Image (cartoon, coloured by chain):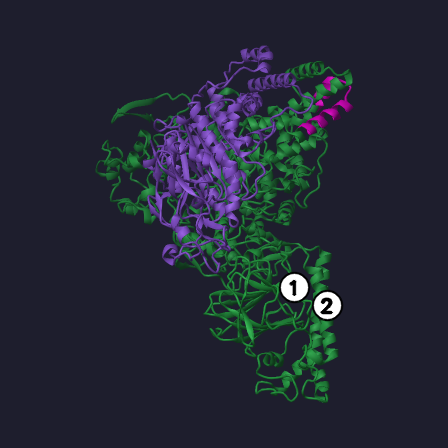
Amino acid sequence: MRWRGRWPGVLHFSRGGLACRLVAAGVVVVMGGGGTVSVWAAEAPVDFNREVRPILSDRCFACHGTDAAKRKGDLRLDDRAAALGVLLPGKTGHSEVVARIFSDDVDDVMPPPESNLSLSADEKEVLRRWIAEGAEYQGHWAFQPVVAPVVPEASGLPGAPRNEIDVLVAERLQKEALSLQPMAAPARLLRRLSFDLTGLPPGLAELDAFGEAMTASAADPAAVVAATVDRLLASPHFGERMASDWLDVARFADTFGYQSDATMQVWPWRDWVIRSFNENLPFDQFITWQLAGDLLPGATRDQQLATAFNRLHRQTNEGGSVNEEFRVQYVEDRVETYGMAFLGLTVGCAKCHDHKYDPMTQRDYYSLFSYFQNVDESGLYSHFTDATPTPALSLGTVEQERERALAAARVVRAEAELALQRPLRRGVFAEREQVGLAAAGDGAWPDEIGRFALDEIKDGRVLNAVNEAEPGQVFDEVAVVPGRHGQALQFSGENNISLSLGGKWTRDDAFSVSLWINPPAVMERAVVFHRSKAWTDAASNGYELLIEDGRLSAALIHFWPGNALRVVTRDRLAVNEWTHVAWSYDGSSRAAGLRLFVNGVEAAVEVVRDALTKDINRGGEDRLTFGQRFRDRGFKGGAIDDVRLFGRALSRLEAAALSGVGSLTPGGAGPGPLVSQDDEFEYFLLAVDRPYRDALAGLRDLRRARSATGDGLPEIMTMRELPSPKPAFVLARGAYDAPTDPVSARTPEFLPPLTGAAPANRLGLARWTVARENPLTARVLVNRLWQSFFGVGLVRTPEDFGVQGALPSHPELLDFLAARFMDSGWDLKALVRLMVTSRTYLQDSTVGGDVRSKDPDNHLLSRGPSFRLSAEQIRDQALRAAGRLDPAVGGPSVDPDQANRRSLYTFWKRTMPDVRMDLFDMAKREVCSARRPLTQTPLQALTLLNEPTFVSWARLVAEQAEAAHADDGEAIITIFRTLTSHRPTDRQLQILRELLVEQAAGSSLEPAAARRHGLQAVAQAAMNFDESVMKR
Amino acid sequence: MTPMTHPFISPVDPVRHASQLTRRHFFSRSSLTLGGAALAHLLGRDTAVAQDGPALGGLGQPHFAPKATRAIYLFMSGGPSQLDLFDYKPRLNADHGRDLPDSVRQGQRLTGMSANQATLPLAGSAFKFARHGAAGHWISELLPHTAGVADELCFIKSLHTEAINHDPAITFFMTGAQIAGRPSLGSWLSYGLGSENENLPAFCVLTTKGKGGQPLYARLWGSGFLPAAHSGVKFLPQADAVPFLKNPEGVTAVGRRRLLDRLAELHHDEYERTLDPVVNDRIAQYEMAFRMQTSVPEATDFSGEPESILEMYGPDVRQPGSFAANCLQARRLIERGVRFVQLFHQDWDHHGGLPGAIRGECQQTDQPCAALIKDLRLRGLLDETLVLWGGEFGRTAYSQGKLTAGDYGRDHHPRCFTAWAAGGGIKPGVSHGETDDFSYNISRDPVHVHDWHATVLHLLGIDHERLTFKYQGRRFRLTDVHGTVVAPVVA
């Protein structure tokens, strides 16, 4: 415990060899040990929340708290009923707790020495007194309802309070014999307001105008301040300033993180954030859209876009990663970001076990987890393609999206027309002369483009009977074994044959593959054929026929699983026996258009996915390969015979014929019992009837046109709820592969439930988050906003409102602001206005030593805020001072070395962030962060002194002043004001004049150049001067 | 803690002498003294939020007498093959080409790169092994120089980790956790033990230039939730070794000193007007920056190194940014009082073509590693400097991809691998832990990453259970809630 100031009446006595200090009645103590400053009079009863809980929580709860699994001696001290055995209210002499904490015996004393924890004499005394006074517990303050305090009249309080903030602050100051400071000088005020509301320094003209207005209305400066605040709130830079803080919370970055750290296109979400702040979207909606915009009825594009918030976590594409392991990590990140951003809780502590300090159970954690996992996503983003991880939202311009919609409508119309044509073609079919479908013969079938008997391998190739110029390539010694007809090829799992034919089929092309396969066993997973770069780490982009759990699984994939179609046969394949398989796809991008025939009969399939909306041709490797795939399990021990490729969908009749069940030749074996008139008609349409085939070609062209308008459009990762939730479980020790008890989506049990019906999905969670009864959200938000303007929150641990977090320095003020915020309809600009027009905010920050010693860290708000500018603000100020700032709002992120854009828009690479920003404590943006440390390091000094862009900006500042002012003094004043917003004092001016003179003299340049050199030094000094990096 | 002076630091600085008058001038006018207190602020002060209670700050002093005061970590990124360097397994040569027995694999997970492989053929090392030194350490022919200092080394053959992919595995070794956001080992040391010098950062990072392989990133030497001042400072292989060290073009040393003197005058005046202690920190900040402008170039200038020393490190030492140059740089930083030097050498990720590729990495690293040990020994620094060598995991006994005559690849293997340590507090000549005949499972004395960290901290005088930092309501440790000091390797 730290003791500050002079304490008359402090009583010293000894007990057990330890010096204890008790405070005589009526004396006020400022205490720093428990994490906050608390003030109380000693004769008042011990306050559980302020005094006792911090001690119990920090020293006892780890073993005697909420986590049942780690509880020692079956004793819990966080629950009064359970603790009554060891603490007897009013009877300290009989309370085991008292005996143990005051014990000198190393075997008895609590906390035990091996815990590396101990209690100070004062802390022991607090516990003793608390028990003596009845050992009453209170609920943790942050979990109690927000109740707006009755704010007394301002009259009688010193320092001319202006609004409720001032009254609550001044009341408290009065107890310390302190009062609000006078308003800061106009230049200081405008600098403070400009940085806080726009992130930019005021211009010289703005400083002049504000100064004059303040002088002119000295009687009522409040009106001038109010007008200025309104002007700044209306600036488009207001949204940028607010967004800076929100991007830290949302862990926004331009790359995926992890090892290859590829570019992640999420800047449109950032622009939506800026827009929302500028338009003052009510904050409850700002939250709701981000958590669950996709679930709002008739969700607009912005509402869906907002949900990208949940997808900004890091993602990996490292080859060989276990998909599920990383998917679970992503969901955890969403949960932990949600917890810190809105509830101010360290929910991550409950991932592996019940929270040790807060009443959050592991079950609560995985119940939250359940909300955030119901999207069709992969644990890996695509290593080999630039496909956007699913779910994704198309972000074409209005024009592009309209074009795509029109093109899609044309496809729908053509499909309808084709359906109408079919009955009309019946007539032609009926009138045709010959039943035998004469077009088919023993040679190439209609539209057959490849036929590989696979009877031998010659020079590393296999022959193509219908096109000699397109043989297949054999990779790595494939075995030739007896086949279904003649010989066949048997694969090792590592070797393959591959064809350039089929390598460029698109989702708009109809195409078919016929082959015989002979699997050696019920295969868990085996690649029969595919066109793709690699396994799921390529998002599986392409098409593929696999065996999964003994069944055929056929898919066309843009990004697995969210943008793909897949069908899986209901029956398992026969083992160690030849089976004929025909894959027939009609170019429709629909699961219904992908048919599998097994031994000539259309197989019953389960549709696993039916949501293919983009191309399947990324990643290179434009070949159709049989038997093996990079990093996947090949067709080990399996054999393939008689591969045939067709440039259209196959009819049932053909599939049967290919399998040997029927024949297409007149006078041949004849159609078997499976073949009906309908089958013949289908064959007629697909293979013979020219008008119908022309119509199919027309439809294909329209589909290609549709794809051409849509496939290249940018997308962004968003949330899109699955029709039914994924099963969720408590994961033992947080391990992805150790599911235990099933859980379902629900809010933490220790917090009030949502009243009224709410869906058990993210929308329900969002409604609960912004409900008036939620004790945390509004408190957490107003606290972070307060921190943004005052440097330190009313709760100094904005990331932790739990039991281990700091207590609020001004609890009533926090609740007043939270209640006001909610009751105003979550009007953020109104809340900002309330804060920055308060006398508390407008106070001067320079005070005498007595105020400083009474309130060294300004926790009592005895003066105005004073802290270092953020990394972005330091760069933006220099850029603006140099006259080079491009004030455009929004757009793609830009190279920080090339750009004159605001720092908000500079590209943030997670694994190698811009060193200049990093050195100035920019948030890393790897995980959610609710506050940045503000450090001072030598490397920062070197950056401002020597980094080439900062140096060039300083020189530009000097050159502008040089050109504008022949007088050295005027030039120095302009430079100084541009960088610090202040007119230099006489002393400062004198020092800078001396600097100018000695630098010019030392330069051995001719006079004009020497003056420039000197002014450049002045600008460098000003840029490195404390007032230039501070907001005071 | 009190900064220690070091015999190797030369405080003489001509520029400072030239401006001594001015400096004396302003110091004399100030009632302030700039010393330990300001420096302490500078090295860790978060101006917005003061530290929590007294028990939670830096250690002030080590928990017990340290065996080593400084450390150099030669991190071999990518996962070097223990099977081809130190963990001699003749059984693999005998069974070359046979499938890894299921009884050995025991269903353990493989990476997605070889999990789908049709067979898992065992691959015997292509390299000859021999015993070296009085201790008889098995070392392969790839490392003749390392073999020459075998008696200084202590091997741990039973390291194991939980991660199977690079990013989480490297992050685990560097920060004690697989997920991002925790402070790195060097940051913990800087935080716990403070700096031994006023002119250089406590924690420096050197990466071999021009290497491919697994990327490295600032997180690996970041301070996590510790104050940013404890982050590692990356030294670049160029004149401007620390970012923005060099004065801008057209600014002379004297001109800069004068500018800083005037800036200091402005700051003293500002302090008198505001009484804000932050301003004092700023004065110290600029003074240390200025000192670094001379101390860093001095520390990175090899021109005074005798030819015999350069030769010892090998010809690469003349290439700035080579592993050899970085080893020599590490010695120079250590002797100037830098607490912790972290080297990274990439490209050990030999999934295919291992015999050829590993030879190249060994050629680049073997001689410098041995030279570093000898050089430290020569200067009497080895006894107080802990030197560590190792990667983030080992490699599989079976070949990834096709096994052919003379060629094979090896996939990631977290279940056992080898690291070595030498110097301060290490028992030389010891080989700790054993693996089975396939170097697939540990058969004796497993050493987890947390144990490795606990031991490193122990040697530096820190009880790993007591070096904590309270963040988000919890006391965090480098070793989480695990870790046991590996006593048999401690001298």
Mark 1 belongs to which amino acid?
Answer: Ser
Say if A915 sits above or below A447 in the image.
Answer: above
Q: Secondary structure at mark 1?
A: loop
Q: Residue A548 location in percent, x, y?
A: 49, 67
The single residue placed furthest to the left in the displayed view is: A94
Q: Chain of mark 2?
A: A
Q: Which mark, residue A500? A: 1
Q: If the image is split into quadrants, where does the C terminus of chain A sit?
A: top right
Q: Residue B224 location in percent, x, y?
A: 49, 38
Distance from the alpha carbon under mark 2 to that under mark 1: 25 Å
How crowded pointer 1 is (Cα within 10 Å; few <14, some 14-19, many 20+) is rated as some
Q: Nearer the viewer, mark 2 or mark 1?
A: 1
Q: Is residue B275 left or right of residue A877?
A: left
How crowded pointer 2 is (Cα within 10 Å; few <14, some 14-19, many 20+) is rated as many
Q: Name the residue tied to disc 2.
A: A702
Tell me where the magenta segment starts and ends, as one range.
A951-974
Mark 2 belongs to which amino acid?
Answer: Leu
Q: Main secondary structure of the magenta part?
A: helix
Are dots 2 and 1 in contact, CB under 8 Å?
Answer: no
**Front position in the image: B192 or A375:** B192
Q: Residue B42 location in percent, x, y?
A: 51, 25
Q: Residue A714 location in percent, x, y?
A: 66, 54
| Residue B467 is at least partly visible in this image | no
Is residue A459 on the magenta stretch? no
Q: If the image is split into quadrants, where does the N terminus of chain A sit?
A: top left
Is residue A955 on the magenta stretch? yes
Per the rendering, the colour in which chain B appears is purple
**Front position in the image: A529 or B242:** A529
Say if B83 sits above or below A571 in the image.
Answer: above
Per the rendering, the colour in which chain A appears is green
Q: Which mark, residue A235? A: none
| Residue A952 is at least partly visible in this image | yes
